[in-house]
Structures are given as structure tokens and as C-alpha cells.
Amino acid sequence: MHKVNRSVPAPADLGVGLVSIPEGTDIELDVRLEAVMEGVLVSGTARAPFTGECARCLDPLDSYVEADFQELFVYPDEDSEFSEPAEGDDEEGVNHLEGDLLDTEPMVRDAVVLALPQLALCREDCPGLCQECGAKLAEAGPDHRHGDPVDPRWSALGALKDTMNDEQEG
């Protein structure tokens, strides 16, 4: 077993929705490499800062994401059951060692993107924005209100009501 601690720069387009890890930001990797019968088992943790916007109020936010990963890289051996796919089998998802090298970027990318929050919030109880005027409800206070919205489909009946009230008064 071999342990590796390393910081690597984040690749481009590492994000989802309103949050992402800026390109070039350091991703801290704690990786454990273990020799197994079929190849090398790579497991570990990736930690990185992310930036984005709150899904409710659109305020900027900064936080950290931590993602665990584990993947088997098989030896390129003719005798291995993983080396050549049987006829009709799909080789997708099987990682091969290339000499003494293994490419961990796709594995780390998948783990980090899946660990990013789909709807990041600046705080758990963020009330968001007013639907009418767009004001931040956290700053507007509990007495923030607008007039009763009138459905435009009822405007003709409102005009008829006003006409009838005028006739009754006169």
C-alpha cells in the first residue's frame, strides 16, 4: 500500500448548475494505492473550494466540497479476466494501467462534480427573492407586501362591478 498527498490544479468546466470550482484552483488529494490481484485499487478523498450563487437569493457564496472516490485499474495482461472484454461485453467503466501510469482525472472529476450541491444555499433558511419586485426577502422584513394581485382575466368583471356601483349610487 502506498499513500500520496498532493495538490493539483482544477481542470476547466468543473461544476454543475450555479456552483463550480474555478479553473486552476488547488484540489487537495489524499490517495491510497493498493496492489490487488487484478491491478491497482485507487481510493481516496478530494477537497476543493467552490464558488457560486445561492439558488434562492443569488448572493455569491464560497464553500468547500469533499468527495470520496474508489476505482480499480486493471493490469494489461492477457490472462486477466478484465484485460479483454468478452464478445458482446461492454468495456466501458474498466480502467487500464498504461505501464506504470494511471489516469485519475476522470475519476476525481466525476466524484467532485457529484459531490457539489445541486442547489447551494447561502444559509439553510434563506427566504429568497420577492416574486413581485425582486427584493431580497431577508432584507425586506416580514411586513414586505404588495397589493392584492388581480388576475387580468377578472378585469372585465371588475369594470362591470364599478359600473354597477356607479348606477346604484346615481
Image: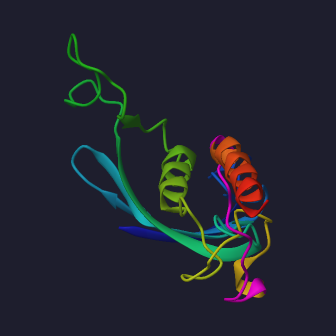
| Above or below: residue 169 compared with residue 5 | above
Residue pushed farthest top?
87
Start and end of the magenta stretch? Answer: 140-153
Q: Which color scheme is applied?
A: rainbow
Relative image position of residue 11 (x, y in whole percent)? 71, 50
Taking the view exactly as shown, the residue that stands out farthest to the front is 170
Residue at 39% across / 62% down in the picture? Answer: 43
Q: Most prominent secondary structure in the magenta stretch? A: loop
Q: Residue at left 73%, top 82%?
A: 144
Q: Is residue 155 visible?
A: yes
- For the point 36% across and 34% down, the residue is 93
* Residue 101 seen in this snapshot: no
**The N terminus appears in which quarter of the rendering?**
bottom left
Q: With 131 as the anchor, is 68 left or right in this view?
A: left
Residue at the location (53% across, 58% down)?
118
Q: Position of residue 47 (x, y in %)?
A: 57, 71
Q: Between residue 27 and residue 13, name the one nearer to us.
A: 13
Q: From the top left corner, tell me how far across and down residue 7 is, in percent.
A: 67, 68
Q: Is residue 91 left or right of residue 55?
A: left
Percent across and percent down for residue 161 are: 67, 52
The C terminus, quarter of image: bottom right
Could you say which is closer to the camera, residue 66 or residue 163?
Answer: 163
Give the total number of marks visible in the rendering: 0
Does 169 lie within the magenta span? no
